[in-house]
Image (cartoon, rainbow, N blue to C red):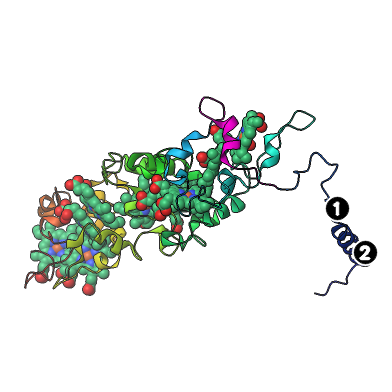
Amino acid sequence: MLIKPDPRHRLSSVFVFLLLLCNISLAIGDENVQATAEYSKGASQCMSCHREGREPAAHEVFLGPMGISGAEKSPFADGAHDCETCHGPSASHRKKLKDGTRPSPQVSFAEGTPTGPQNEICLACHSDGNMIHWFGSVHEEEEVACTSCHDVHAQQDPVMDKLGQQEKCFACHPRTRAETFRASSHPLRFGQMTCTDCHNPHDGANDFLLVRSTVNDTCYTCHAEKRGPFLFEHAPVSEDCTLCHRAHGSNHDALLTQRSPLLCQQCHSPGGHPATAYTSESAENSFQNRFLLAQSCANCHSQVHGSNHPSGVTGLR
Ligand code: HEC
Ligand code: HEC
Ligand code: HEC
Ligand code: HEC
Ligand code: HEC
Ligand code: HEC
Ligand code: HEC
Ligand code: HEC
Ligand code: HEC
Ligand code: HEC
């Protein structure tokens, strides 16, 4: 569709051009507009107010890895703008206006401010390594801020800590928290494992933000013996562990999605088997019933994940 240029637009652009030509700042005379962005002379100016003991204090940033003055590529490197590398040019914030209000720093990272521009500040320094697939990841698309997970002012960022990390994740993923409290679960809530053993919260390259390209490759990083190779594979095992297991937790033994025999009977009909009728109604009083107690089908088919025995075709050994 073509849009005819509105002559008024052209007039106004001429007007703006004239303004620029005369170098007149549009903000002059308007105290509510953030004055032209200027940097202050550095951290010492900010720290005259934000020092320890004053609210809001900011001294802790110097105790963390990003606050090392002069370190290469740090916000406090020579030639960088110290606090304002992140907070943007904020000289005007240092003085109150006539009406007694204080202009906000250019970027406050306060809740409710748009995420895109905030994240860009961080990405200016952190775009390599495991950040390269940030764009297109679920968290990026859902406009999750870096600072929803990271606390850059803290001496020790809680999300880098084994238990602290989960608390951050659970704030937005309460269902996952519930799963980790089920009868059978990966030992997440004891801090013996972390979400980031299986997920890379920055990386959209793999489904479900997994650290490996498939579910199985992710599981094999710790359960390598399940990879095989097996003389006799069990098809669903090499296809996807989550056909039978829940990664976070389950109310059935061994993180299983279902109790046996129902687990197996989702895919295997009783027909043709040496024994039929394995549901609670049909197996009642039948002689096979006792074989379905305890490990159920696995009483006989113990090699559920695959077998290397020459006669292990049905996983009996
Ligand atoms: C003269 C004292 C003073 C100086 C100097 C000062 N601030 Fe502030 N700043 C405050 C006060 C007071 C607040 C609390 C919020 C308010 O009253 O507006 C604040 C709040 C902030 C906030 C939180 C803003 C928000 O909206 O949540 C940030 C970020 C900040 N200052 C950064 C800086 C930076 C960066 C510098 C140096 C360029 C700086 N401040 C210099 C007094 C100061
Ligand atoms: C690496 C980027 C970065 C640097 C460098 C940085 N800040 Fe911040 N600042 C943030 C972020 C992000 C927040 C929002 C709170 C959070 O997530 O930690 C914040 C919050 C603040 C607040 C509000 C704190 C509160 O309790 O409400 C103040 C004040 C502040 N910064 C001042 C400063 C001062 C002064 C410096 C320099 C000494 C500085 N910041 C350096 C990123 C930075
Ligand atoms: C001017 C460059 C710069 C900017 C901007 C910057 N960082 Fe950093 N960041 C660094 C450097 C340098 C380090 C320390 C060396 C390293 O770990 O790569 C670091 C370290 C970190 C770490 C590792 C902390 C740890 O405990 O190991 C995190 C997390 C981080 N930054 C998050 C952020 C976030 C979130 C923002 C935006 C609010 C941000 N950074 C903005 C330069 C920067
Ligand atoms: C959903 C939560 C989450 C979000 C959002 C997030 N991070 Fe992280 N980030 C983490 C966790 C968890 C770790 C620790 C990784 C580990 O222990 O393997 C981490 C580690 C880091 C590190 C240090 C280790 C490394 O990978 O170099 C940096 C730097 C970092 N994040 C920067 C960022 C930046 C920049 C953003 C925004 C573009 C961001 N993060 C968004 C959770 C998050
Ligand atoms: C043992 C590996 C593993 C660990 C540890 C793990 N996850 Fe997962 N997660 C997975 C797999 C595999 C999926 C794919 C979905 C499925 O289960 O079918 C997934 C899916 C998810 C999903 C999306 C689907 C859903 O279930 O809602 C979220 C959200 C999630 N995980 C959050 C977390 C959080 C938060 C933690 C840390 C408390 C965590 N995960 C720890 C393996 C893991
Ligand atoms: C500020 C909120 C927030 C935080 C904090 C957060 N997430 Fe998410 N996460 C989301 C949203 C929104 C989605 C997309 C909707 C959904 O699946 O729930 C998502 C999706 C996911 C998914 C599913 C990805 C997919 O492809 O379906 C995983 C896995 C995940 N997050 C892991 C984590 C981990 C691990 C942490 C902690 C390091 C974390 N999240 C922290 C908001 C958050
Ligand atoms: C970071 C290492 C790690 C990864 C990755 C991992 N696991 Fe585990 N897994 C463990 C640990 C540790 C245990 C607990 C062992 C114990 O309690 O003796 C465990 C236990 C299990 C159990 C037995 C639970 C029980 O109650 O007997 C199953 C089933 C399991 N994992 C399946 C998976 C699946 C499926 C995946 C991939 C989605 C996976 N694991 C990925 C470390 C891992
Ligand atoms: C066809 C269903 C099925 C699939 C698919 C499956 N498992 Fe299992 N898995 C089971 C059953 C049933 C048990 C319980 C067996 C028992 O109690 O002896 C189990 C137990 C486990 C255990 C704990 C006991 C042990 O043998 O170490 C781990 C770990 C495990 N599975 C990992 C995996 C991994 C990793 C995958 C994907 C490569 C996978 N499973 C795929 C059915 C399955
Ligand atoms: C997600 C579907 C699925 C589940 C759940 C499942 N299986 Fe299988 N199973 C298969 C497929 C597919 C084959 C391969 C069939 C073929 O090659 O004809 C197979 C093969 C077998 C075989 C070998 C059959 C043959 O003729 O070689 C046995 C025995 C077996 N499964 C037992 C079990 C047991 C025991 C369970 C429960 C612990 C179970 N299966 C759960 C899909 C499943
Ligand atoms: C009492 C031991 C025993 C129990 C319990 C048992 N099986 Fe079997 N199953 C066998 C034997 C033995 C064979 C091999 C028969 C043959 O080679 O002709 C077999 C064969 C199979 C086969 C191969 C194809 C076929 O039909 O011959 C499948 C699939 C199978 N069983 C599934 C199951 C499932 C699902 C369960 C649980 C509901 C189960 N089995 C319980 C002993 C058992």
Q: In the rendered image of this protein, does residue 41 appear above or below residue 99?
A: below
Does any portion of residue 271 appear in the rendered image?
Answer: no
Q: Residue at x 14, y 48 (%)?
A: 294
Q: Nearest the camera: 151 or 273?
A: 151
Near mark 2 (Cα within 10 A), the count class, few <14, some 14-19 or many ≥20, is: few
- Mark 1 residue's CB less than 8 Å from ligand 1: no
Image quarter of the N terminus: bottom right
In the rendered image, which quarter contains the C terminus? bottom left
Q: Which residue is mark 2?
A: 11
Amino acid at pointer 2: Leu
- In this rendering, would 79 be left or right of 311? right
Residue 130 % position (x, y): 41, 60
Q: Is residue 117 visible?
A: yes
Q: Residue at x 13, y 65 (%)?
A: 315
Q: Which one is earlier in the sequence, the residue at label 2 or at label 1?
A: 2
For ligand 9, give the image quadrant: bottom left
Q: CA distance from mark 2 to mark 1?
A: 18 Å
What label sits on residue 147 in the rendered view?
none
| Rendered position, 156 above or below 268 | above
Q: In front: 286, or 217?
A: 217
Q: Residue at x 32, y 48 (%)?
A: 248
Residue behind mark 1: 24
How many numbered marks appear?
A: 2
Is residue 43 found inside the magenta-colored segment of the image?
A: yes
Relative to the observer, which residue lies in front, 265 or 243?
A: 243
Helix, strand or loop under label 1? loop
Quick one: label 1, few (<14), some, or many (20+) residues within 10 Å?
A: few
Residue 90 horizontal side relative to residue 73, left or right? right
Residue range in magenta is: 38-56
